Amino acid sequence: MTVGGGVSLYTFKLDSSAARLGVTGGLFGAPDLSVTGSTSVQEGDEPSVGVNLGLQVRASPTVSVGAVYRRGPTFEFTQTDVVPPRAPQVRTGDFRVPDSFGVGLAWRPTDVLLATADYVRVRHGRLRTDFVVFQAFSTGTEEQMQLEDGNEIHLGLEYTLKQVRMTPALRVGYWRDP
């Protein structure tokens, strides 16, 4: 059995501004840059730490099984919304990088052929609280904002050319990330 882990230092910089503009000549007219309806500014600049852990077990001489977990870092940001005629609203929230965890299998039927398969669950929903919901403030649709977690499937095949100088490997793979 092999166990591993790591700690990573991440940096985060967010500097975003958005404005709803008026239009001239009706609903589908050209934007009128002199008329601003609502504005939103997001700002953040800080470091954070993320952690990952892994485990690999050799089930037989040709089969290995593994598991991995990655805890995404969290960063604080501030959002200022101005939606006339309401007073400006300043909120502080967290930008949560999605966590992920997965399991995988590696099978080496010969010394030149390796087949792999794994499944990874990505918790995209961590972004909904604060970061995604804050963006719906001006329209009052915070509760309608949804962000589903994802399932990824990875498959791979590697063939090593042992008879060739420097031993290159040919690889092919498939990744499904809905």
Image (cartoon, helix red, strand yellow):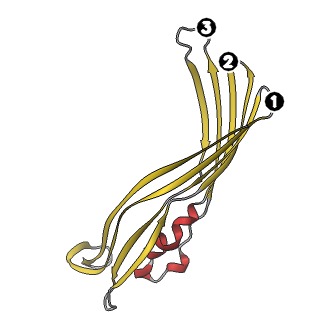
Q: Picture coordinates of residue 144 (x, y %)?
A: 55, 77
Residue under pointer 2: 112
* Residue at disc 2, secondary structure: loop
Query: At x 51% / y 55%, what residue is drawn?
Result: 50
First of labels 1, 3 by sequence position: 1
Q: Picture coordinates of residue 117 (x, y %)?
A: 69, 38
Residue under pointer 1: 60
Query: At x 63% / y 25%, what residue is drawn?
Result: 158
Quarter of image, res 3: top right
First of labels 3, 2 by sequence position: 2
Residue 157 in the figure: left or right of residue 97 = right
In this orientation, which residue lies closer to the viewer: 148 or 101?
101
* Residue at disc 3, secondary structure: loop
Mark 1 against mark 2, which lies toward the viewer?
1
Q: Picture coordinates of residue 71 (x, y %)?
A: 57, 56
Query: At x 61% / y 37%, what residue is drawn?
Result: 174
In the image, residue 18 sits, relative to residue 164, either above or below, namely below
In the image, residue 21 sits, relative to residue 85, either above or below, namely above
Residue under pointer 3: 163
What kind of residue is marked 2?
A: Val
